[in-house]
Image (tube, grey):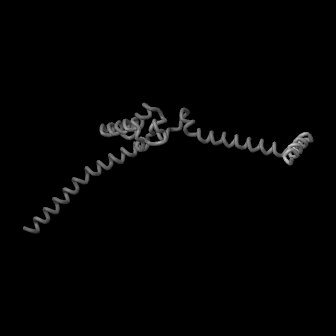
Amino acid sequence: MNRACSIVLGFGLLICITVSAKPLTAVSDFEDRYHSILNELRCLVCQNQTIAESNADLAKDLRAEVKKMLLEGATDSEIIDFMASRYGDFVLYRPPLKPRTLLLWFGPFIFLGIGLLVLALVLRSQRSVGSMPLTEEEKMQVNAILDKSED
């Protein structure tokens, strides 16, 4: 009888562990989806943080909206699409490549190119000005200034 009780108790314990593990997995999946979505959305107030990182009031509201939609059974893509339709593609950390978002994708490279072009032009103009020989009049002005400084 003692052995039979041990076997029944062992099976009961195994069933309890199995039953209790499923809700933990569901909670873990929910949390994973929740955090994954939060990391896909940009805080419109901070702009350099996700809504997961931001403490702005709007980010708090967006986190609550994401949680509510997940609890209602919305898919990840439905939530992302809803946020993009409501706030525009800028809310997405990886906005889709389309004509309206070209500046988001290529703007930094364009500004870098313009900056490098300006730098090259400035360096070229300094080099060409510095390499021109002085005229006789300029040489006399320089000598006059040097003579005054020696006095």
Name which residue lies at 89% across and 45% down: 143
Q: Position of residue 89 (x, y in %)?
A: 48, 35
Image quarter for residue 18?
Answer: bottom left
The residue at the far top in this view is 86
Image quarter for residue 128?
Answer: top right
Can residue 133 be seen by looking at this rendering? Answer: no
Q: Position of residue 35 (x, y in %)?
A: 38, 45
Eyeballing the image, is 39 above or below 11? above
Say whether residue 106 is left or right of residue 117: left
Say whether residue 120 is left or right of residue 110: right
Q: Position of residue 34 (x, y in %)?
A: 36, 44
Image quadrant holding the N terminus, namely bottom left
Eyeballing the image, is 26 above or below 45? below
Say whether residue 131 is left or right of residue 62: right
Image quarter for residue 119?
Answer: top right
Say whether residue 83 is left or right of residue 115: left
The residue at the far right in this view is 136
Q: Nearer the viewer, residue 50 or 23?
A: 50
